[in-house]
Image (tube, helix red, strand yellow):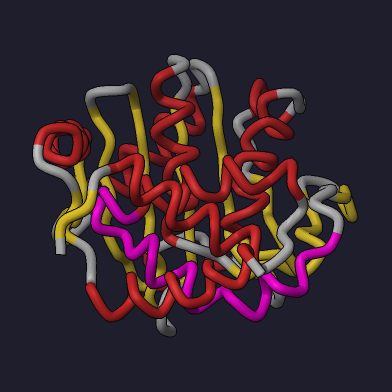
């Protein structure tokens, strides 16, 4: 079924409200999940899969538990992904080009939005999201017009980055040679791309002009949950 982008965002916001997600995170979470749905990254699917975690959402604060490690406080990535972006933009890791690990968080492919946001600001960026073992989903950006998403095996990325309990890894850097070189090596390994900067522009244009084709069953199930916010 086809829906408009405002309808999609509004639908997800009702779910977040029904789950009693902290009010300051609802808009960002809805926009993030909608972006993931538009880009074909399963935004609605993740909202459904994360329902129990969303219902237990605690304080969206991030905690520095170790050098280059953030504690997600058992939250869904849907409600803290943009907080992570803001945290990294204010941290020294951006100038040093060192990946930051996120722990105790339920990851989502929609977190890839952070790479796109970083690229728009002129940064190089990379994110690693564990998939079904031994797969790792990766998105890289050398600049705004060179964004690539692909899947590699764990053995093809730095194994030391994925210690036990790591939910995802994100790096944003400005003109950092080490980051640029690592991204170039990753891009060279990519067997196939499932999303590129060109794809993203086309998908967004299609969403603006025609709407988004969503799964009717998922839409209805989430709609039932969202209706609880009206009770």
Q: Which residue is depicted at the point 55% across and 32% down?
A: 172
> For residue 165, what is the image quadrant?
bottom right
- Magenta span covers which residues? 37-58
Q: Nearer the viewer, residue 127 or 157?
A: 127
Q: Which residue is depicted at the point 43% across and 42% down?
A: 113
Left or right of 179: which side holds 190?
left
Left or right of 162: which side holds 5?
left
Residue 103, image x and y in percent? 73, 64
Q: Nearer the viewer, residue 67 or 155?
A: 67
Residue 143, image x and y in percent? 33, 22
Q: Nearer the viewer, residue 207 or 122?
A: 207
Left or right of 24: which side holds 217?
left
Q: Residue furthest bottom?
A: 133
Tell me, yes or no, if residue 198 can be seen here.
yes
Question: Split into 4 quadrants, where in the image is the C terminus?
Answer: bottom right
Tell me, yes or no, if residue 155 can be seen here.
no
Q: Residue furthest front?
A: 231
Q: Main secondary structure of the magenta part?
A: helix
Q: Which residue is depicted at the point 31% across and 38% down?
A: 184
Q: Which residue is depicted at the point 49% across and 33% down?
A: 179
Q: Is residue 166 magenta?
A: no
> For residue 17, what is the image quadrant?
bottom right
Question: Split into 4 quadrants, where in the image is the N terminus?
Answer: bottom left
> For residue 119, what is the image quadrant?
top left
Q: Nearer the viewer, residue 78 or 121?
A: 78
Left or right of 151: which side holds 193?
left
Residue 148, image x and y in percent? 26, 43
Q: Is residue 54 magenta?
A: yes
Disc count in the image? Answer: 0
Residue 14, image x and y in percent? 54, 58
């Amino acid at each position: 079924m086809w829906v408009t982008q405002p309808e999609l965002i509004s639908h997800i916001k009702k779910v977040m409200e029904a789950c009693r997600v902290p009010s300051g995170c609802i808009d960002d979470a809805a926009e993030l999940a909608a972006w993931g749905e538009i880009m074909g990254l399963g935004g609605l699917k993740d909202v459904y899969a994360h329902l129990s975690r969303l219902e237990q959402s605690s304080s969206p604060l991030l905690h520095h538990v170790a050098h280059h490690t953030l504690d997600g406080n058992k939250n869904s990535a849907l409600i803290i992904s943009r907080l992570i972006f803001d945290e990294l933009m204010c941290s020294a890791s951006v100038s040093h080009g060192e990946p930051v690990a996120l722990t105790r968080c339920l990851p989502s492919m929609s977190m890839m939005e952070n790479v796109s946001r970083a690229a728009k600001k002129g940064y190089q960026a990379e994110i690693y999201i564990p998939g079904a073992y031994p797969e790792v989903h990766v998105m890289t950006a050398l600049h705004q017009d060179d964004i690539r998403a692909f899947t590699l095996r764990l053995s093809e990325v730095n194994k030391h980055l994925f210690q036990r309990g790591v939910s995802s890894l994100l790096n944003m850097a400005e003109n950092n040679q080490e980051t640029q070189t690592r991204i170039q090596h990753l891009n060279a390994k990519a067997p196939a791309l499932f999303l590129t900067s060109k794809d993203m522009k086309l998908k967004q244009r299609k969403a603006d002009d025609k709407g988004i084709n969503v799964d009717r069953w998922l839409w209805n199930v989430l709609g039932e949950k969202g209706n609880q916010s009206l009770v």
